[in-house]
Image (tube, rainbow, N blue to C red):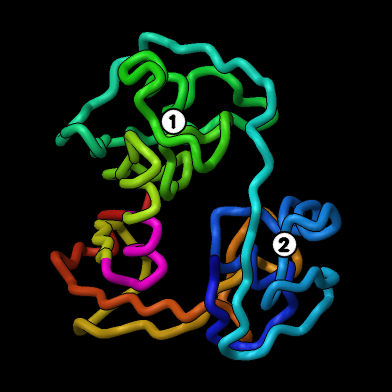
């Protein structure tokens, strides 16, 4: 269930505020699995502030993923969740062209059926994701209760994410970037800063400046 915070198209709002892609959002809408204030609406329906969106996810498809004995670094684990240090180069969940060697394949080996089912068979336990070429900590839900709780914390911006990165250019002071992010209109597989995107605030702190001449080959 989503409470609308700003007017937008129904399909776009779902894609921007959940882990559901816009294509899947359209499919759910066309199948009547999405209601706005209790009524079925079309994908182009313009939402109003305080509208309530309810999404009914279909039963998981009958797809069997292979549990693989892949070494993963688990930095924390209890009965409800685990935190994995995902390495650079590993895909988080299966997708066309990547049905093996993913983090999910490794989690299935480690956890068996002790993963949440909310995101279906393709993404068991996956609450959020990071890009293939990004390394870092990923929280995985081991049951539906923890999945719902973690999703709410993410949607309410109560979870802070910290990253370390190397950037080109000269940065002289700590600052804040406040720019809305959404699907890139020219490439739906990428994100970009757009006028009507989802609010995104990044506070950055300079750890170290390098001599730029050392980076030139």
Q: Earlier in the sequence, mark 2 or mark 1?
A: 2
Question: Does the magenta stretch mainly form a helix, a strand or a loop?
Answer: helix
Disc marking residue 167? none
Up the image or down, 175 lies above or below 54; here it is below
Residue that badge 1 annotates: 90
Disc marking residue 34? 2
Where residue 17 appears, as percent x and y from the top left, is 55, 67
Image point (79%, 60%), residue name: 29
Q: Which quadrant would residue 97 be assigned to in this image? A: top right
Q: Which residues are magenta?
A: 150-158
Image point (43%, 77%), residue name: 200
Where residue 44 appears, as percent x and y from the top left, is 83, 75
Label 2 residue SS: strand
Apparent side of residue 85 relative to residue 39 in the rendered image (left or right):
left
Disc 2 crowd, CA 10 A, few/some/many (<14, 14-19, 20+):
many
Up the image or down, 133 lies above or below 54; here it is above
Label 1 residue SS: loop
Where residue 8 appears, as percent x and y from the top left, is 69, 82
How far apart are labels 2 and 1 at the CA level?
Answer: 33 Å
Q: Which quadrant would residue 139 be assigned to in this image? A: top left
Where residue 111 appears, as percent x and y from the top left, is 32, 20
């Amino acid at each position: 269930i989503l409470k609308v915070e700003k007017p937008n198209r129904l399909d776009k709002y779902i894609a921007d505020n959940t882990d559901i892609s816009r294509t899947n959002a359209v499919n759910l809408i066309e199948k009547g699995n999405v209601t706005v204030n209790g009524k079925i609406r079309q994908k182009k329906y313009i939402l109003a502030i305080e509208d309530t969106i309810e999404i009914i996810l279909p039963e998981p498809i009958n797809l069997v993923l292979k549990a693989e004995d892949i070494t993963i670094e688990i930095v924390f684990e209890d009965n409800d969740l685990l935190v994995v240090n995902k390495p650079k180069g590993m895909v988080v969940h299966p997708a066309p062209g990547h049905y093996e060697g993913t983090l999910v394949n490794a989690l299935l080996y480690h956890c068996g059926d002790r993963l949440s089912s909310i995101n279906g068979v393709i993404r068991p336990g996956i609450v959020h994701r990071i890009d293939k070429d990004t390394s870092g900590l990923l929280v995985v839900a081991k049951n539906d209760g923890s999945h719902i709780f973690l999703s709410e914390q993410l949607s309410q911006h109560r979870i802070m994410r910290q990253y370390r990165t190397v950037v080109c250019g000269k940065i002289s002071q700590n600052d804040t970037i406040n720019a809305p992010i959404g699907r890139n209109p020219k490439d739906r597989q990428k994100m970009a800063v757009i006028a009507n995107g989802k609010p995104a605030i990044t506070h950055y702190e300079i750890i170290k400046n390098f001599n730029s001449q050392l980076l030139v080959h």
